[in-house]
Amino acid sequence: MALMKRVALAPRAVRQLRRIRSVYLAGAVLSLLGLVLQAERGSGGRQAVIVTVLLVAFSALFTLTIVQLWRHARTSHCSTAQKLTPSA
């Protein structure tokens, strides 16, 4: 297994990831709602495919955001994170 270099994110990047996380979650929930409504109507076709693609895209973006924030939390003890984090 290759060693991964852990690099701390800048505080601004962490704030942006935390903000956009809710947008991705809302997009995934709305896409799921649209998919359920399309299934209830019984009319599939192109609209159902588009909603499914949107659901997959928002879910993937949300997952990547969560992983990035989780990896950043694990690097909080490294010296780079301490240099980038303002001391209060």
Image (cartoon, rainbow, N blue to C red):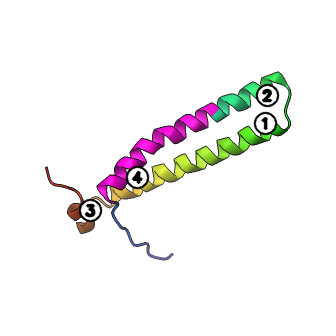
Q: Real-space Cα distance between discs 3 and 2?
A: 47 Å
Q: Nearer the viewer, mark 1 or mark 2?
A: 1
Residue density around tag 1, few if under 14, some if 14–19, many if 20 or more, within 10 Å:
some
Q: Which residue is drawn at 77% across and 28% down?
A: 38
> Which stretch appears magenta?
10-30
**Does the residue at mark 1 contact the one at mark 3 (Cβ under 8 Å)?**
no
Residue 69 is labelled as 4
Which residue was labeled with disc 1? Answer: 48
Q: Real-space Cα distance between discs 4 and 3?
A: 13 Å
Q: Which of 31 and 71 is in front in this view?
A: 31
**Does the residue at mark 4 contact the one at mark 1 (Cβ under 8 Å)?**
no
Q: Real-space Cα distance between discs 1 and 3?
A: 44 Å
Does the magenta portion include 9?
no
Q: Real-space Cα distance between discs 2 and 4?
A: 34 Å
**Does the residue at mark 2 contact the one at mark 4 (Cβ under 8 Å)?**
no
**Does the residue at mark 1 contact the one at mark 2 (Cβ under 8 Å)?**
yes
Give residue 76's position: percent from left, percent from top: 28, 58
Which residue was labeled with disc 2? Answer: 39
Q: Which of marks 1 and 3 is in front?
A: 1
Residue 16 is labelled as none
For residue 83, which quarter of the picture? bottom left
Under mark 1, the amino acid is: Ala
